[in-house]
């Protein structure tokens, strides 16, 4: 199921180590046989079994848990195989995102979350480029949905991402509504009042706009990116207008 050869000793050892860790942490219980005195057949040391043994797994009840559906796991295995991705890393990423999803119906972030790239990278050990790659692939395959709420300007006039909201793909409407409310309250780009020279931010905006316009020419732009392009162009035009007004006042 994981699309690894049985002769791949490194991956077989990885699987054994993970199973042993789950046993040691009391996350699962493994048995060789549950029909005849299952207590005697309980596995405490994964080295005591043969790789061809058929295992029975019991997962104790827990209060705090993260849900991932069987069909999602099967789809993730398929995606990992199709795109030649590391299976563990991909599933780890999805589970990490899911673990942050807000399940409180009274909260404005219900069914959403926004872990930062730094937290994701530090916790599961993948870089920003891999996070972006996984996110794009999972969104294209309708597993996850995500969008930047907007951007913020540093004191040096550079643009940085603000919150990146994530949800299951089925909850697109909730995420879209939340992102739109966030932008109404904070603006698509939160300008720093301490930065008087806006030439840097204009340059950054233009680079982002050019990148998205190139995607239009290549016919690879998504609907989400088209909406982002529209908002970026509006912000750029505002800064252009301000520049012209300031110039005319100084003259």
Image (cartoon, grey):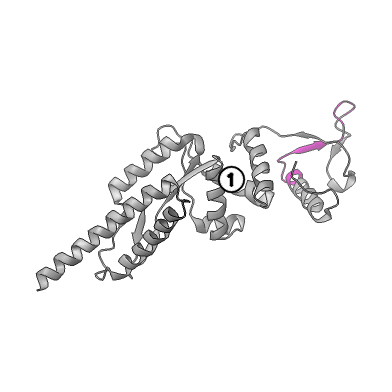
Q: Say whether residue 185 is left or right of residue 91.
A: left
- Up the image or down, 210 lies above or below 43; here it is below
The answer to whether residue 164 shows anywhere in this view is: yes
Secondary structure of the residue carrying numbered label 1: helix
Image quadrant in which the C terminus is located: bottom left
Q: Nearer the viewer, residue 233 or 178?
A: 233
Residue at 77% over, 52% down: 14
Residue at 11% over, 69% down: 248
Q: Residue furthest bottom?
A: 251
Q: Nearer the viewer, residue 28 or 196?
A: 196
Q: Position of residue 112 (x, y in %)?
A: 46, 41
Q: Quadrant of residue 22?
A: top right
Q: Say whether residue 31 is left or right of residue 80.
A: right
Q: Position of residue 1 (x, y in %)?
A: 75, 41
Q: Quadrant of residue 126?
A: bottom right
- Asked if residue 164 lies in the magenta stretch, the reply is no
Tag count:
1
- Asked if residue 29 lies in the magenta stretch, the reply is yes
- Up the image or down, 233 lies above or below 199; here it is above
Magenta residues span 22-37
Majority SS type along the magenta span: loop
Q: Say whether residue 40 is left or right of residue 151.
A: right
Q: Position of residue 67 (x, y in %)?
A: 59, 35
Residue at 70% over, 33% down: 60
Q: Residues within 10 Å of mark 1 (few under 14, many from 20)?
A: many
The answer to whether residue 148 shows anywhere in this view is: no
Residue identified by numbered label 1: 94
Q: Nearer the viewer, residue 226 or 194?
A: 226
Q: Position of residue 163 (x, y in %)?
A: 41, 52
Q: Say whether residue 247 is left or right of residue 8.
A: left
Residue at 28% over, 46% down: 184
């Amino acid at each position: 199921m994981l699309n690894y050869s049985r002769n791949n000793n490194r991956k077989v050892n990885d699987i054994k180590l993970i199973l042993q860790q789950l046993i040691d942490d009391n996350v699962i219980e493994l048995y060789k046989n549950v029909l005849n005195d299952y207590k005697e057949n309980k596995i405490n040391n994964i080295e005591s079994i043969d790789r061809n043994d058929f295992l029975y797994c019991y997962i104790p009840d827990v209060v705090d848990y993260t849900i991932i559906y069987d069909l999602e796991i099967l789809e993730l295995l398929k995606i990992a195989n199709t795109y030649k991705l590391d299976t563990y890393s991909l599933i780890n990423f999805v589970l990490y995102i899911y673990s942050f999803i807000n399940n409180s119906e009274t909260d404005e972030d219900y069914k959403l979350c926004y872990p930062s790239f730094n937290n994701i990278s530090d916790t599961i050990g993948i870089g920003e480029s891999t996070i972006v790659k996984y996110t794009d692939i999972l969104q294209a395959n309708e597993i996850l949905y995500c969008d930047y709420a907007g951007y913020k300007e540093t004191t040096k006039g550079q643009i940085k991402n603000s919150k990146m909201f994530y949800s299951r793909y089925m909850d697109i409407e909730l995420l879209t509504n939340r992102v739109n409310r966030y932008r109404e309250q904070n603006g698509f780009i939160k300008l720093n009042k301490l930065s008087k020279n806006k030439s840097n931010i204009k340059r950054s905006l233009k680079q982002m706009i050019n990148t998205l316009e190139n995607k239009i020419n290549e016919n690879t732009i998504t609907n989400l990116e088209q909406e982002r392009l529209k908002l970026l162009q509006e912000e750029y035009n505002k800064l252009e207008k301000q520049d012209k007004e300031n110039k005319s006042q100084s003259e």
